Amino acid sequence: MTTTSDAPGGTHDLSVGMVGYAFMGAAHSHAWRTAGRFFDLPLRPRMTAVAGRDPEGVAAAAERLGWESTETSWRALVERDDVDLVDVCTPGHTHAEIVIAALEAGKHVLCEKPLANSVEEAEAMTRAAERAAADGVRAMVGFTYRRVPAIALARQLVADGRLGTLHHVRAQYLQDWIVDPQAPLSWRLEKDKAGSGSLGDIGAHIIDMTQFITGDHIRRVSGRLRTFVDERPLPSEHSGLSGTAGAGTGRVTVDDAATFLADFAGGAMGVFEATRFANGRKNAIRIEINGSQGSLAFDFEDMNVLHFFDGTDPAETGGFRRILVTEPGHPYVGAWWPPGHVIGYEHSFVHQAVDLVRDIAAGTDPAPSFADGLQVQRVLAAVETSSDTDSWQEISA
Amino acid sequence: MTTTSDAPGGTHDLSVGMVGYAFMGAAHSHAWRTAGRFFDLPLRPRMTAVAGRDPEGVAAAAERLGWESTETSWRALVERDDVDLVDVCTPGHTHAEIVIAALEAGKHVLCEKPLANSVEEAEAMTRAAERAAADGVRAMVGFTYRRVPAIALARQLVADGRLGTLHHVRAQYLQDWIVDPQAPLSWRLEKDKAGSGSLGDIGAHIIDMTQFITGDHIRRVSGRLRTFVDERPLPSEHSGLSGTAGAGTGRVTVDDAATFLADFAGGAMGVFEATRFANGRKNAIRIEINGSQGSLAFDFEDMNVLHFFDGTDPAETGGFRRILVTEPGHPYVGAWWPPGHVIGYEHSFVHQAVDLVRDIAAGTDPAPSFADGLQVQRVLAAVETSSDTDSWQEISA
Amino acid sequence: MTTTSDAPGGTHDLSVGMVGYAFMGAAHSHAWRTAGRFFDLPLRPRMTAVAGRDPEGVAAAAERLGWESTETSWRALVERDDVDLVDVCTPGHTHAEIVIAALEAGKHVLCEKPLANSVEEAEAMTRAAERAAADGVRAMVGFTYRRVPAIALARQLVADGRLGTLHHVRAQYLQDWIVDPQAPLSWRLEKDKAGSGSLGDIGAHIIDMTQFITGDHIRRVSGRLRTFVDERPLPSEHSGLSGTAGAGTGRVTVDDAATFLADFAGGAMGVFEATRFANGRKNAIRIEINGSQGSLAFDFEDMNVLHFFDGTDPAETGGFRRILVTEPGHPYVGAWWPPGHVIGYEHSFVHQAVDLVRDIAAGTDPAPSFADGLQVQRVLAAVETSSDTDSWQEISA
Amino acid sequence: MTTTSDAPGGTHDLSVGMVGYAFMGAAHSHAWRTAGRFFDLPLRPRMTAVAGRDPEGVAAAAERLGWESTETSWRALVERDDVDLVDVCTPGHTHAEIVIAALEAGKHVLCEKPLANSVEEAEAMTRAAERAAADGVRAMVGFTYRRVPAIALARQLVADGRLGTLHHVRAQYLQDWIVDPQAPLSWRLEKDKAGSGSLGDIGAHIIDMTQFITGDHIRRVSGRLRTFVDERPLPSEHSGLSGTAGAGTGRVTVDDAATFLADFAGGAMGVFEATRFANGRKNAIRIEINGSQGSLAFDFEDMNVLHFFDGTDPAETGGFRRILVTEPGHPYVGAWWPPGHVIGYEHSFVHQAVDLVRDIAAGTDPAPSFADGLQVQRVLAAVETSSDTDSWQEISA
């Protein structure tokens, strides 16, 4: 296999083919388009092809998002010789099949989170990734929030021992987009497509983020899932987050909200909450970590800020420091603008693309790996089982 | 020159006898001294006597805190004819005996929280209060945070239906005063005196506050208690929160931190956390409640503020309103200062005294009642059992 | 003269006589009543007498606020042998006469701010204070905000060099209580009684606070006064802040808002703003100071917090520290409650009483002195002249 | 496989030539590259050519930023037939010559702010723009902060009368990048290149922003400029914001900080401050506006939020609303991501490009016009004269 293709108009390209072009597809397209404009990349991403089943839809998406060509089947895209990397932005139930095929075709893979809709699928994908890795093929799962500079800085501070022994992890991912019972039934509310609801969609993020920041992993959970609104209007058309109600109703088959207690392997106590019913909270990812030497707090609604309490400051002048994470020495952010010129949501996708391209060029394994994605999947499954059985559940290593 | 007088034995006095004079004793003394200066009271509190075992200690306390006389046994105080109300500010393991004796002696009782160190004691106290009530004797448990104006306003907004159906209750009580492993073993860390640790001491507050605000109660829990530091230096002297380390070490027999999931009877999902190990958080009581029509958020570190999201505001101009709870129309606070002139921690003790005096004068039952205190005790016990048995526990009605 | 009187029931009392009993009278009464309950005082304040012209009003105030006796003329109070200290809480136009008489009668004086309604009066008062000081009589002006713990801490940090050379001082005192044009004409809006409007009432505070924190003084100003609403309904009765509108209208003769640029003697640039028309701001005193080594920020609406930027922190972990000023090592606050148990507006009056009592006992001159008050008066006058003449005005030393 | 194309010379392209490629050039390039990916545009921006004097520098910039070709003289670029719009991103002293030549060559112009370094230049440019407008040529000045969604929303709320009559405008633009006296002398500190210092560089933004939001203009000012550090190390090489110190020192010929009082034509009082010496403040643009019906507050460090106080809310539930300006109905932002997925600094440049392209296609005059830029220039000049003469200065209409 060849890692890079010699496309017309440039050597050292990394040719990307993307499957799916909705919300995540737009974010990934932006990342491929932008990464090389702000970061020095060893390979130049080329937006070779985008695949989607609807010929008109995919053509319009290619035009708008800037892809050179289209395919109406993911399989055709995976089989193209001029594609080096397959970027999977489809709903979770389709991940396993596409990803395994791509890996077997020798393509690097970037797969949106959650890795899959079940532990079994995630295991198969992880095995496929391990096999492919032996041939130099790279696989990464798209937990992009790791690449928010404030989160990457949080990781550094913990790794540097600035928090000491960790005692508490509290994490919330709060949205409110279906608090209205008349919000229509999108695919994200159907278990066969989405796998789970708030738990897998947004709870997965805070599981990954807290495990990433702490460098630790969850070993047991006691969880509670709830569906507040069981029946919703069918959408007038299939339209993701923004659908309008049509005729008839359908059954919500995923959780509206999930809460769980967690024990981390290293001893910290965790409290997690993911919900789409937190009225007034739009995308509030809040993480606070308390350790013997210090603490950290983060809220995505103010994503350029990390609050850091340094327990070694004198009591009289100590306090949570509002670090505006826009300094040249901070992770990622120096490539953008001068200090204080804040960045936004999609920048973490750019950082993800940068890291992946660099790993591919360097021949190193990217993180988060599929094994990381599988471990998150196991936590999700354990929470679900816990809720079903009213019992604590262990997460197998 | 005209002289105002405050004749001993005046018919309109309410004669108070207080047991205990440490942290809570100082707060209650301030309340009795101050209530009538800012609020119109139907009875004038008179600070008749304070009781404590150490003659010198209690004499000094009476002098400093402004009590007219002292007793060196609580029983002597309870038996005094010139005491109308017994205010119990001692550690939890002494509550049942003192309170029951006082009620049986026909004294009104204000009992600090938690009501007792066990459900059994709390039940006995509640029965005693019910018996005494038949004779017009009033009993109240001191969950003072209900009387923080922002919390009282929160209760009003929920009761007025401004939040609609409640979906989420998240509550944290975060302190850090024993995060240092060398902090000495105070009585608050000994189970035989304190009953429990963070759970009973501060977790009890957020249980009461959320039940008060929601007008609902917790019906089942899954909890987790942890003691991060098992062994601590013995204090050089018995000195509550501020002891310095002496010789030898002793065993910590209570929890350092407690987390639990809760189902409310009315359907809301709860997540609770109480800890003394949240580095950098001094007395952070944070409560957020999300309902179908709106949301509320509160943090005691900024206690004069209530954040209110009104879901009926247009999306374009909606947002959490930072209500500075210092307006004349807000609960309690109009008696103090003009708008914007914020109040502090001890004001809620004054409000508690005001409400209790008014109830006594009016012959009405004060809230929170001993039955309310017993219900909190049952939640505490259920959390503890849940943690011991790794199972969900129901709270008996 | 005798500094302390031997009142019945106690030696070592400091006998206080207060003139005026409205908003400030209530705050001062609370302070005298409370100071000795939380702080160790060398003299015990005794609330001997309160004076006011209306016999019924003053009697009711004495009863409510806890004064032992009443006088219906300030002169009678000043002449009483059993009064050691005269506490002047009347409107500014009465200060000079009362204060000078009290000082000449050998009474210590606490005078509410602003010291007077004119520089001439303030000068006369300062001369009287200097004469009296020769006989051991103490005089203090009531800029209480200096005694907010966060402000006292700010002063310490500047004095300790933690901010380096000061470049910027920006201060705002924002209220909104007369933004409604129908708010009635209180005495605070009449120049003959109040001296000035927002400038003298609240602008005076931020002048004193910034001069106190910086340890520097303003040497020239360019200012602008405005009256947005010239004519207002007369109040139905004379009732301070809370009057309701009666028949007829009257002319507003003071400023509704004042802004000014300032040069500090030490080189810092100042920007000041005081207004009663900042809709939604109730008592927002905001001060930010930037120096070569660090910065400070304060907002009274969250008065227990001081934000401190330490420029010597590494850029990657630097940020404004949210110091919760409730630690035992912080100024004043350790006498109250454990860390995190926040205090309120009136506590600074208690601190003022404590400091004054200690100075009287120790025979030391209290701060802020009348000379400090006079200097503030000169700044106020310079701002007014500047506004009248559209020119920069120097403040004479 | 279907291939999308972007044929050279396509009839629906808007061909852009950019002059300058430093900080602003990177931001503008991003805008041209991105605008059509998220917004529906009537013309497709084509990044035809970039000009710069250094052949290697401009070639590297073209490669990195994505421009099709290069020119080493702005004049060559202006004369190219295949350029429709000239985007001027050079220092202020070069604006007039380039812009006037471009307009005379019939090119649309986007000119970075401040429009020029003097009123005379700005007047000449404005006259040139007016002449060109007669031929359908469009000219816009790049006050991008108008296109921050929260600022555009602020404008809407004022225009809709939600604030009533405006009383107060307070605005600060706080940076700290030269607080270190050893920060080298960049071109931004030299008057012949930069025109002015903090005043023109960042003060210009808050002048434009507040005039935009209020729909009003400043008519007179009293200002104060200061240079705290007169002499600085020469940079080791010419490198804008991020230079390192070289040998020798040079004289700072612009202001480090500027403060001024302002009267708005409509009656509001303004207080402005722009500084590069606000230690710890990186890019804090803070604007607060108080009116008879409500208030607004904004801080760029949390740029997705607008605080809005609606004075018509009942006092008990009123408070500043923290509006997260990410709703579909908010200006601009709906084109990006779902609610709560915040945007960053450079997005306003994209919005600027979108608006300009739409105006060009529609044949309408863009805002802010050169006349708007000239008016800002006049305010800047008036502040400078005011500071030099210690007098209030009128701004000619």
Image: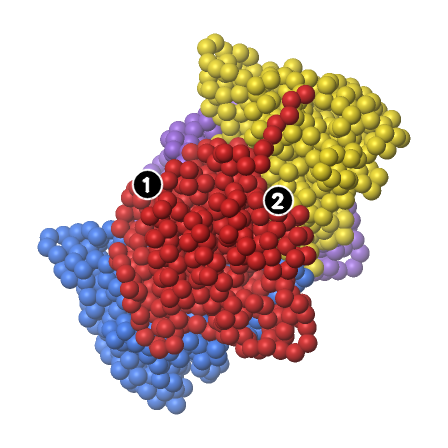
Chain colours: A blue, B red, C yellow, D purple
Determine which quarter of the picture holds residue B314.
top left
What residue sits right under mark 1 in the picture?
B313
Q: Would you place residue B229 above or below residue C279 in this image?
A: below
User: Do the residues at pointers 1 and 2 share their chain?
Assistant: yes
Frontmost residue, B70 versus A202: B70
Q: Residue at x 70, y 19 (%)?
A: C74
Q: Nearer the viewer, mark 1 or mark 2?
A: 2
Left or right placement of residue D2 versus residue A267 in this view? left
Q: Residue at x 23, y 66 (%)?
A: A254
Q: Would you place residue C4 above or below residue D394 in this image?
A: below
Helix, strand or loop status at disc 1: loop
What residue sits right under mark 2 in the picture?
B68
Q: What amino acid is at disc 1?
A: Asp
Residue at the extreme right of the image, as rendered = C134
Instruction: Answer whether residue C55 is visible to the viewer in this image.
Output: yes
Frontmost residue, C65 versus C102: C65
Marks 1 and 2, how far apart at CA: 55 Å
Determine crowd level at label 2: few under 14, some 14-19, many 20+ residues with C-alpha closer than 10 A.
some
* Residue D217 horizontal/vertical position (percent): 52, 28
Left or right placement of residue B310 versus residue C242 in this view? left
